Amino acid sequence: MNLQSNPDEKTVSTQRHQFNYFACFIDSVGFPFGICFFSPVTILPTFIRELSDNKFWIGLTNAISGSAFFFPQLLAASWIERMPIKRGYVISLALIERFAILALVPQILLLGRSSPNLLLILFSVTFSIFTLSMGFNGPAYFDLVAKVIPVTKRGTMYGVAGGIGGLLSSIFGAWLTKYFLEGYEFPINFSLCFLAGFIILTITVLPLGFIDEPPSYPSQPKRLGKYFRDAIVILKEDWNFRYYIYSQIFISAFGIVLGFLTAYTIDEMTATKSDVAIFTATLMAGRTIGQPFWGYVADRRGNRLVILINTGTTCLVILLIVTANSITVFYGIFALISFCHSGIDIPSLNMTMEFAQTDKLPTYTALRSSTIAPFRAALPLFSSAMIDKVGYPPVFLACILLLLLSWHSLWKVEDPRYQPVEQT
C-alpha cells in the first residue's frame, strides 16, 4: 500500500524561501514603478511649479523627501527590536503610506485652482505623513529582509527587481505620465498621476503581509533611554561604522543635485512638461540599467566599492550639468545621475545591514538614519535660499566638495562584509 507523505522539511523550507523571495522581489519591483508617477526628482518639482514660483516649496519637498524617512527610525527601532515578528507591523505602516498618497487626489482636485497656497501646505503635511510612515517602517522592513534574504542575494534581488521596476517605469510609466500631463488640464493631470502611483504601490506591497518570517528575540529587552545610550556607545566605539556615518552625512549633497535638477532645467533651459516626462523616462532607464548592474557588482565585490565608484562619477556628472547648454543633453544627464544613484542608494542600505548581528540590525539602520536626517533636512532648505542668491551652478559645484569629503571618509572604512561582525 502506498502512503502519501507530507513534503519533507527541506522541500517546505525551499518553498517558504521562494515565496519570501517573491514577496520581497515584487515589492522591490512595484516601489520604483509606483513612485515614478510622483517622482520627487521630476514630477513633484513640476507639480509645485504649477502652484508657486517660490523655490522654498521645492526645497521643503526635498527636505521632507530626504529626511522625514530617516528622522523617526532611531525612536521606532527601540520598540521594533523587541518584536519577534515584524511582518504585521511592516504591512500596516506600508498601507498608511499608500493611503496618504491617495489622500492627495481629492486635495489636488478641490484646491488645485482655487487655493494653491492651501494646497501646498496640505501637500507638505500629507507628503510628510507618507515619508514619516516609511521612516517608522524602515528598521522593521530592513530587519525583515535581513531575516529572509541571504546577504549574498540581497544586492542581486534589489538590483534585478529595481531594474525591472525601472524598465516598467521608463516605458509604460513614462508614457502614461506624459499622457496624463499633456492629455488633461491641471489639476486633473497630477491627480491621475498620484492615483496611478497609489494603485501600483498598494497591489505590489500586499505579498509582504504573507511572508513566512522566523522569530527573532533581542538578548535583553531595553527601555527607550537605555536604547539611546547603547546607540551612542555603538557610534563611539565602532570606529568603522562611525567613518561610514561620516561618509553618509557628506553624501547628502547628492540629494541637492537630484532634487533641484528638474527645477534647474525648467528655470535655465525652459524645459516643458513633455521634457519632464522624457526626463522621467531616462531617469528610470538609468535605474533599469544601474540597479541590476551595481547589485551584481556589490554582491561580488562589496557595497563599499560600488559607493566609492559612483560618488566619484557623480562629481563628473555635476560638472556636465553646469556646462551643458542643450536640453537634449539633459536627457542623458538624467540617465547618468540615476545610474549613479542606483550605485549609492541601495548599496548604502545594504552596507548598513552588514555592520551588525541580526538582533541589532534595527539599531544600526536607525542610527545611520537618525544621524544623517538633520543634514538631509537642512541642506535642501539652505540650498533653496542660496540658489535664490547666487544661482544654481555655484550650489551644484559646492556639492562636489561635499561628495569628495564623502568619498574620502568611505575610503577609510573597512568593508564590514570582510570584517568581524561587531567592532569596538
Image: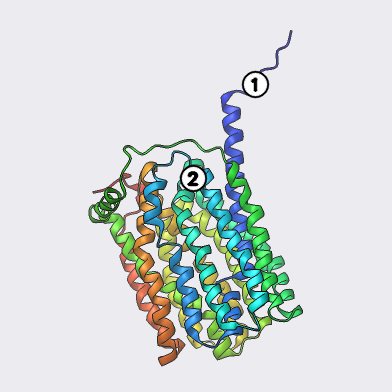
Which residue in the protein does label 2 denote?
Answer: 144
Which numbered disc covers residue 69?
none
Relative image position of residue 359 (x, y in whole percent): 38, 42
- Residue 291 to residue 113: above or below: above
Identify the residue at image location x=29%, y=61%: 243
Height in image: 1 above or below 204? above
**Other-residue count near label 2 (Cα within 10 Å), few / some / many at <14 / 14–19 / ≥20:** many
Q: Which residue is mark 1?
A: 6
First reached walking from the N terminus: tag 2 or tag 1: 1
Residue 285, visible in the rendered structure: no
Image quadrant holding the N terminus, namely top right
Residue located at (37% from left, 55% from top): 75
Look at the picture and state if 169 lies above or below 380. Answer: above
Front residue (pair 117, 374)? 117
Q: Residues within 10 Å of mark 1 (few under 14, many from 20)?
A: few
The picture places residue 339, in percent across and down from the top left corner, at: 54, 67
Q: Quadrant of residue 196?
A: bottom right
Q: Residue furthest right?
A: 183
Say if residue 89 shows up in the picture.
Answer: yes
Q: Nearer the viewer, mark 2 or mark 1?
A: 2
Contact between marks 2 and 1 (CB within 8 A): the answer is: no
Q: Is residue 291 above or below residue 147?
A: below
The amino acid on which the numbered mark 1 sits, given as a three-letter code, is: Asn
Q: Is residue 133 left or right of residue 419?
A: right
Tag 2: residue type? Answer: Leu
Identify the residue shown where x is 61% and y is 84%: 50
Name the secondary structure under disc 1.
loop
Taking depth in this image into account, of 15 and 88 the one nearest to the observer is 88
Residue at point 48%, 40% (across, down): 85
Image coordinates of residue 288 in percent, x first then y, are: 61, 63
Task: Give the image location of residue 269, x and y in percent.
Answer: 58, 89
**Disc 2, SS:** helix
